[in-house]
Image: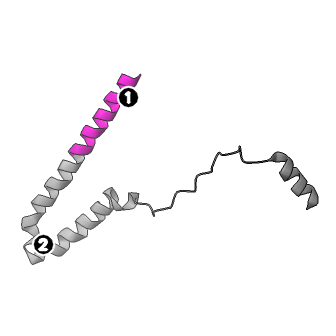
Amino acid sequence: MNALRTKEKALDIIRDRERDAQSHAGSYQLGGRFAQLSNFISDLETKVPEFYGQVGQNLNQWKRSPPKINSATDDVDVEAIVREAEEY
């Protein structure tokens, strides 16, 4: 079972690297086209939504993780809590 998971993880890593390589190759191909002002706007109008679809829409706002609860219950005196509740 662990071997299967390891193989799946390896395949995921390979797919991610292939996708990254393809996106980088696409940026190098655009370098010459962006040198021409007439192509700049048309290429920008197609590439920006494509980039947002691949990257931007998956971003989330950063959220602070909730505080961790201390599990130190040795310091709690149950009888003192009961007395305090009765006095209240």
Checking the image for residue 59, the label placed there is: none
Q: Which residue is mark 2?
A: 39
Lateral position of residue 84 relative to residue 35, left or right: right
The quarter holding residue 60 reads bottom left
Q: Secondary structure at mark 1?
A: helix
What type is the residue that disc 2 sits on?
A: Asn
Pinpoint residue 29: horizontal percent, then vertical percent. 10, 59
Pinpoint residue 81: horizontal percent, then vertical percent. 84, 52
For the N terminus, the quadrant is: top left
What type is the residue that disc 1 sits on?
A: Arg
User: Where 26 sits versus 18, above or below?
Assistant: below
Q: Which residue is mark 1?
A: 5
Tag nearer the camera, 1 or 2: 1
For the C terminus, the quadrant is: bottom right
Query: Residue visible at 10% across and 77% down?
Result: 37
Disc with the residue nearer the chain's start (1 vs 2): 1
- Let me know if residue 16 is in the magenta part: yes
Lateral position of residue 5 relative to residue 42, left or right: right
CA neighbours of label 1 inside 10 A, class few (<14), some (14 to 19), many (20+)? few
Q: Main secondary structure of the magenta part?
A: helix
Q: Nearer the viewer, residue 19 or 50?
A: 19
Query: Residue visible at 24% across and 70% down?
Result: 45
Q: Nearer the viewer, residue 12 or 54?
A: 12
Pinpoint residue 28: horizontal percent, then vertical percent. 11, 59
Q: Which residues are magenta?
A: 1-18
Lateral position of residue 24 relative to residue 59, left or right: left
Query: Residue visible at 34% across and 31% down?
Result: 8
Q: CA distance from mark 1 to mark 2?
A: 46 Å
User: Where 36 sits versus 55, above or below?
Assistant: below
Pinpoint residue 10: horizontal percent, then vertical percent. 29, 33
